[in-house]
Each structure stands twice: as structure tokens, then as C-alpha cells.
Image (cartoon, helix red, strand yellow):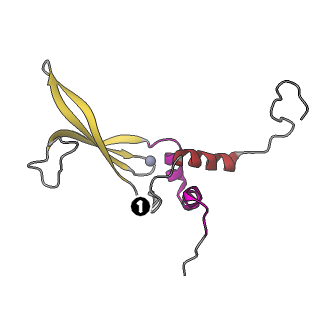
Amino acid sequence: MTTLRSVASNEDAYLASLADMPDAYLECRATQHRMNVTDPFRIVDSRTEQGAREHKGHTLYAKRVCTCDRCGMVRNDYYAISSRRGHHFLTKINATYEPPEGYAVHGLGRVEGGRGLVLGLGLDITETPVRGRGRPRRGGGAA
Ligand SMILES: [Zn+2]
């Protein structure tokens, strides 16, 4: 049986979806992924390599793969290759992501302030009430 929960906005739906998410996923959403290179740079020719496609109009490019050691997110980085005075020069042109199971929040599109919401969730959990330290008053007027 499916339980339906009424939500007021995309933000509410987003927060509801975060409730079941593993802590590691929330940490990555709140800070950043801890990426390590798991497949070093190599040159890809998308005209001849099976399964490869062009990126931003480049058929020949350098690719490397990074993986987050906390959540398992995989990021594929694509770089244009140029040469200058005998040295190769790489300029990032694209990146694609392969999220671990359960990381993506489906059906909401992009939530404005998504990272801010995750940080706010962290504050909700850790915040303890502060007493006797109201907001400083300006100008000495009556409250
Ligand atoms: Zn991560």
C-alpha cells in the first residue's frame, strides 16, 4: 500500500525525500563529494571507440573518471586537447555523473537552493536553543 503525503512545495517534497537518505549521501550533498581519480586520463576518439560520443562538438578528447570515496558517485570529466609550444593543454568541456542507487531525487526537477536545504536540515538537527541572547537592538528604541 502506498501512503500519500501532501506536500506544499517542491522544497517540502525534497526535504521528505532526504529523510530516508543515508548519512553519507547527506554529507556529500551538504559539503562536496570526496573525489579521487579512479581511471586516469586517456585519449578518446569517439569516431572509432565503441560507446563513446562527442562532447561539446569534440570528437577527440581526454577523459578521466573520478569516484567519491564516501557515497560512490562517479564523475566522468571530458577535456578538449590542444597543443602549445610542444605541450598538451587540457580545457574542461563537460562532466557527466553516475549517482549511486538512491542518491538522486526523482520527479522534482532541479530544486532551488537544494544544498541550502540540506545544510538547514543539519542545523535543525544540531541546533540547541540559546537563551538570554536575543537579537541585538539597534538605536535603543522600545521593543
Ligand atoms: Zn559523494
Task: Mark yes or no: residue 95 visible.
Answer: yes
Q: Going 81% across and 30% down the picture, which residue do you hit?
A: 136
**Residue matched to label 1:** 101
Q: Is residue 92 left or right of residue 87?
A: right
Residue 76, can we see it? no
Magenta span of residues: 6-33
- Check the image and report above or below for 45 versus 134: below
Whole-percent x, y for residue 107 in the image? 45, 63
As drawn, is 15 to the left or to the right of 61?
A: right
5 up-or-down from 94: above or below: below
Q: Mark 1 is on which residue type?
A: Glu
Badge 1 marks a residue whose secondary structure is loop
- From this view, report whether residue 1 is shown above or below residue 51: below
Q: Residue furthest left?
A: 48
Q: Does residue 34 appear to the left or right of 93 in the view shown?
A: right
Q: Position of residue 54 (x, y in %)?
A: 18, 46
Q: Which image quarter is the C terminus in?
A: top right
